[in-house]
Amino acid sequence: MNLSYFIAKRISFKRTGGFTGTIHRIAVASIAIGLAILIISFMVLGGFQSVIADKVFSFTGHYQIHRFVLTKSLEESPTSKDSFFYTQYPESDYIRHVQAYANKPGLLKGDEEVEGVIMKGIGPDFDTLSFRSSMVKGRFIQFPETGAASNEIILSTKIANKLLLDVGDLITMYFVQEPPRFRRFEIVGLYETFLEDFDNKVILGDIQTIRVLNDWEENEVGGFEVFLKDPRQIDAHAMDLYDLIDYDLKLVKATDKYLQIFDWLELLNNNVYVFLGLILFVASFNMVSILFILIMERTQMIGILKALGAQNSQIRRIFIWNGLRIIGRGMLIGNLVGFSFGWIQEKTKIIHLDPENYYMDFVPIFWNWPVFMGLNVLILIISTAVLFIPSMIISNVNPIKSIRFD
């Protein structure tokens, strides 16, 4: 049996009471609390970033492709479904889905209020699965099989509340063009993303309505929204799409179009990294301090072992093994606490948020297992490395003086 490990077991945890046992428990608690907080922080940060990004992508796709225009007018120049990109994109294995869209500004007239909005025209190819999480009431638009324009629309809850509307109500929308036109729509659903860029101004309607209003051909659309199989590759595949699109079309990444949202999400990473550094520093400082205390308390034992012929390296390993047992037990408890919190929150959503400030009504959880494994490895390596700092003073312990040490 390894003598150093055997002695380390004898002087740790339940085998030792009083002051030493208390010190061990404090050390375990410091490791456990630090690791649990880090796991929960990365769970919540990842969940927050994932939910916000999914809300944006469900509305815009990962890329938008539309015709070049020289003005900032909300009116779009049409492009054709016969374009090279639309006919060739199925050969690109990194593309999950492409859907056509068109935008047209107008005014919604309620009984007492008028609201300026943008109708986003969509068709049967719209990715309803991605958008489903944002629907809070009603159903999705049903598109006529005859090719006629549907008179159904979906509003945000914010617009509906401003105009005192609900599912099943009829609303008139006026389109500013020459000559002016209007349409009567039925509200069949309400959505809510808590993102002002969408909730304040976007309604969903039939793209065929916009074609009729703009006198477009059946195969003409305002643009295309592209969804990737792996959203994390949005920057990597940008050049591939540039090579695929027609010369008169423009590619816009959703992360660039809504730069303020994604820059803000990126800034949140910096906060967590600072938090990670602080916790690692505190955990390392605690381990050094606690091992110093344990060495000082065991000065007589060190002197006796030296008098019996034990080498400095053997005695040093006793305290390193002791420290590793503390780290291991602390990491085990920390993982149990962190993962238990994540599982409970994911299943019950017991912790709620103010959606006006956080863009969601509950604390989200994201299970990023590579990150969790990395946190455990990082804490294990750093905490183990700092164990060698206090253990170095063992070589300076004088056996005669230490035996008489009180």
Image (spheres, rainbow, N blue to C red):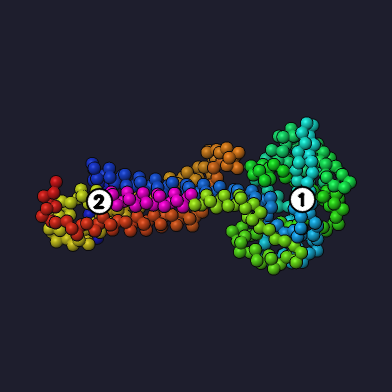
Query: What residue is at 27 percent from the left and 43 percent from the top?
Result: 22
Q: Could you tell whether 379 is left or right of 299 in the image?
A: right
Residue topped by disc 2: 292
Residue topped by disc 1: 74
Amino acid at pointer 2: Phe
Which element carries disc 1, helix, strand or loop? loop
Image coordinates of residue 181 in percent, x first then y, are 87, 44
Regarding residue 253, the answer to whether it shows in the image is yes
Residue 352's place in the image compared with 303, above or below, is above
Taking depth in this image into account, of 272 and 177 the one nearest to the observer is 177
- The magenta segment is 271-292
Image coordinates of residue 244 in percent, x first then y, are 71, 67
Query: What residue is at 70 percent from the left and 52 percent from the top?
Result: 127
Query: What residue is at 76 percent from the left and 41 percent from the top?
Result: 116
Q: Earlier in the sequence, mark 1 or mark 2?
A: 1
What predominant SS class does the magenta segment belong to?
Answer: helix
Regarding residue 121, the answer to whether it shows in the image is no
Asked whether residue 46 is drawn in magenta, I would say no
